[in-house]
Image (cartoon, rainbow, N blue to C red):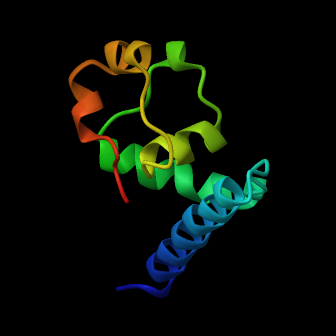
Amino acid sequence: MRLADWVVTRVVSVAAHGLDVALTLKRTPWTSPSALHVTRPVFTALLGTGIPAALNWDDQAFLAAATGRRALTGDERILLGPQAEHFPLLS
């Protein structure tokens, strides 16, 4: 494993665990824009395609759904189609 790839795994892990802490404390997530910038390509690669624009997900919403920190809604499942079965992408 390359060092850069290992660092990405740590960023994803810390972002997901930080989201866990925010949810537990009932606070707004504080994931940094830099961390979200690193996580989006990982989740897009795991999904195998980009997310539909109609979802209107920002990077924070994608992080929460991709890691199973929040369940997909029925409407989101419809918009994702068969890709919805891949969620959570990483837990």
Q: Quadrant of residue 52?
A: top left
Q: Position of residue 54 (x, y in %)?
A: 52, 12
- Residue drawn where x is 26% and y is 29% of the image: 83
In this figure, what is the number of numbered marks?
0
Question: In the picture provided, is 40 more to the left or to the right than 59?
Answer: left
- Residue drawn where x is 59% and y is 28% of the image: 57
Q: Position of residue 60 (x, y in %)?
A: 65, 43
Q: Position of residue 58 (x, y in %)?
A: 65, 33
Comparing 25 with 42, the one in front is: 25
Q: Position of residue 30 (x, y in %)?
A: 79, 56
Question: In the picture provided, is 16 more to the left or to the right than 66?
Answer: right
- Rendered position, 38 above or below 13: above
Please state, as top left, top right, bottom left or bottom right, where the C terminus lies in the image.
Answer: bottom left
- Rendered position, 85 above or below 54: below
Residue sticking out furthest to the front: 25
Q: Quadrant of residue 20?
A: bottom right
- Residue drawn where x is 55% and y is 56% of the image: 39
Comparing 77 with 54, the one in front is: 77
- Rendered position, 68 above or below 52: below
Please state, as top left, top right, bottom left or bottom right, where the N terminus lies in the image.
Answer: bottom left
Comparing 65 with 5, the one in front is: 65
- Residue drawn where x is 51% and y is 79% of the image: 4
